[in-house]
Amino acid sequence: MSVMPLIVLATWLAFTSVETPSPLTTLALPSEPDENTRIDEIYDQESLMLLSLYSLKGNGKADYITGRTVEQHVRSTYGNPVYYTREFPIFYWWNHTMWNDPFVDGVNGNEQVYQEETDFDVSRYKPCVFNGQSC
């Protein structure tokens, strides 16, 4: 057997044995929900983010979370916190996936999957339960 058929055979075997990566099976990120579905807000002082928790199913459990960068945090005349944030979130959690919006321009298709198979851990911010009810 000459060298040329061996090179062709080796090249064919090399290219046909390489598996192409499959596209992500993640669903497209839905737009940010209406404020009427928001069930809680959490200010994360460590990351300077305001987290909004939404219940899309209406069962009181957070299933869509957004994280906005806080640019300024002040107190009102009555002592209530006032947060000045960016217009759009930088992070989204939905369907066991964390998304990053690098351009912070709202949900428009340019969001990137940051981490899959992850859930938002509310207990990190509200770890206690008193008498069976969350604090």
Image: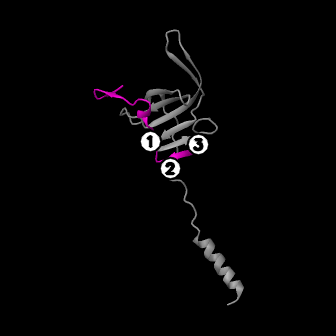
Mark 3, residue position: 111
**Of the pair 79 and 31, the residue shown nearer to us:** 79
Look at discs 1 and 3 and give the one toward the viewer: 1
Q: Quadrant of residue 85?
A: top right
Dot 1 and dot 3 residues touching (CB under 8 Å) = no
Percent position of residue 78, x then y: 49, 9
Q: Earlier in the sequence, mark 2 or mark 1?
A: 2
- Mark carried by residue 119: 1
Quadrant where the N terminus sits is bottom right
Residue type (three-letter) at the residue carrying disc 3: Glu
Is label 3 in a helix, a strand or a loop? loop
The residue under the point 56% across, 33% down is 89
Q: Earlier in the sequence, mark 3 or mark 2?
A: 2
The residue under the point 51% across, 17% down is 81
Mark 2, residue position: 26
The residue under the point 49% across, 39% down is 93
Judge left or right: residue 97 versus residue 15.
left
* Magenta residues, start to end: 109-135
